Amino acid sequence: MFVSISRRVLVALTIAAILQTAAVRAEMRTWTDITGKFSVEAELVEVKDGKAVLKKTSGENVAVPIEKLSKADQEFLQQSDQSNESELNLTLPNAMTEPPEWLASDPGVPFDLNEFFKVPPQEENAAPLYIKAMAESNLRLALHVRGLERESEEGQAFLEEPRRRSRAASKFWIKFYDYEDEPTEHPEPPASEAMAVMGPFDQTTQMLLEAQNRNQCVFQVDRTWDGVRTFDLPLMMEVRAYYALKAGNVEAVLQYFQIELRFSRDLQPRGELSRQLTASRHAHYACVDPESTDSSGYISVANRLLASDFLTVAHCDRWIQLLQQHLDEQGDYFVDQCCADYIIRRGILHDLQSGEYRQIMKEFDMRVPPTGPNPYVYLKDISLSLWSDSPERLHPLLSKAQGPPSPAGEEARLKYSQKLASMRDSDYQREIAALNKCYKNLLALGELPIRERIEQVAKVREPLLDTDVAIWLAPNTNRHILEKPLVSDTNVYGTLCLVAMKRLQLENGAPPTDLAAALKAAGIDEIPIDPFTDEPLRTADVDGKLVVYSVGTDVIDDGGTVLYDYQKKQGDFVFKLPN
């Protein structure tokens, strides 16, 4: 498995963050028996049947009756149990649990606010348990759910152990990536070393499975959450699946696929429309990567499994079942995301009208030099300053990220400031009415198939063309965002075809030459539809091998010979069995 330098750095930093947080739960401490004569360094794994299951430094688990532990240890377990009960209060940092009064009083809101804000009873909703799991791999969320401030004495004490674990784990990742980059020059780290590093993540996987035992999943709207960093969970799981596959444990790999596919269906944090990208990308972890010109040389676990000697017909049947279940149960979240997107942008307009932004803008202008004429980013950052759970850290972070000012940014800032200073309540009412009409048009597109939606989406901005401020808050209707569900479905359909072809190859001992026959042998009556044409996926003989392909986003049939270019958005999504 080869990884580009950019991916290597990204994954290394991400997993370091995961281990920082995961280590909080799996705290190594000294446990003592009630007599005080015996002690052991160990992590608490779980409390079950009146016993504390402890993981020693050797990796061995031991179960100790609670009554035989010291009083201090019993108190520690009681506190841990009370902490676990807090899952019923788990929310995103600034979740909106009901419509804000300023919005509920507006008769022009283009959807039913009360219906949108309904959530299942907490004990039936998977979202709190997902947040609990995500808090294991995100320090900001971990601090939030515990009510801690990073700079406080308690927050710093909380972070000591995760930071120590992170430093120790970094040594493993250096070895792992050295091996991936130059496998002939460096030995592969043994699985035992990998499992020791990722041990704190074991219970996170169980948390995800526990969440997925619940049939409903609805997240609340959070205006300040810039996007839940959910990709770190599958990265860790993928590394575990990598070692599981090397050991021949295909069942563990398929369980990983099952979790990821369900995760992609459930993970719909209600925020900006662009978050469709966040959720849809999780399905590809259970899918074969189509060949493209954008390949970094990285080989996914799904690609590896398809080429593995451990794969059997029964495994193929299970994989196909998971993919078909995903296709049957996934939904179209466009309308839901549009409603959340509206609330965020409408909230920015409200903040501007309220006048509270003026002092914030004065501080913001002093600390954050603008680098370009992007009004939405400018207004959003001002609004977030009002809503952020830690505004004192927001400005320095933005200033550091944006760098020195630019002439275009200075000119734009002056333009925005002057325009906002001249706005009156009557002006804002016209802006609000135009924004309402824009989103009414956008929500109407939810009735259309995705491809028709993409073709018509440019028109929804027309009500904003004559506005002064609302035009800056126009919904992000980038074609790439709206096409993402189609790309995700293409990967699932292509993988379904390849697994069926591999299944027939395992049965017959020879590469398949007919896609329809391979699918029929797997119990699939028809060739899956290409989402970009509404016609069956196409096949071709390329270099003597049967390949399956989609015409891609440009809807041009290149015969499966021109690989998709993610930069140019041209070419075919090509799926073929590995050698």
Image (cartoon, rainbow, N blue to C red):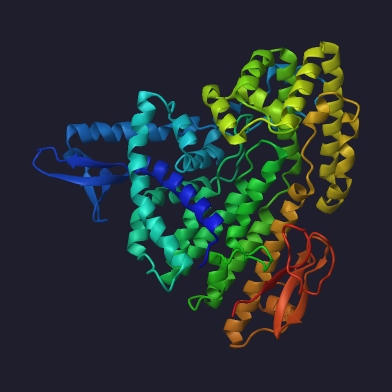
Number of labelled discs?
0
The residue positioned 36% from the left and 41% from the top of the image is: 162
Question: Which residue is pictured at 65% across the width and 75% down the height?
Answer: 500
Query: Is residue 119 or residue 179 the one in the foreground?
Result: 179
Q: Is residue 249 left or right of residue 290?
A: left
Q: What is the x, y in percent for residue 102?
A: 72, 17
Q: State whether residue 366 is above or below residue 540.
A: above
Whether residue 252 can be seen here: no
Task: Point out the residue furthest to the bottom here.
Answer: 509
Location of residue 398 by image quarter: top right
Rendered view: 32 above or below 58:
above
The quarter of the displayed image where residue 542 is located:
bottom right
Quarter of the figure with residue 424: top right
Position of 116 with respect to 195 (left or right) is right
Across and down, in percent, residue 106 comes to 79, 19
Quadrant of the drawing holding the C terminus: bottom right
Relative placement, left or right, of 429 versus 28 is right
Q: Position of residue 466 (x, y in %)?
A: 91, 27
- Nearest to the observer: residue 150 or residue 272: 150
Residue 498: % across, % down = 65, 73
- Position of 412 with respect to 9 (left or right) is right
Between 504 and 350, which is closer to the camera in this rendering? 350
Location of residue 475 with respect to 283 vertically, above or below: above
What residue lies at 52% left-to-right and 51% top-to-bottom?
10
Q: Is residue 268 visible?
A: yes
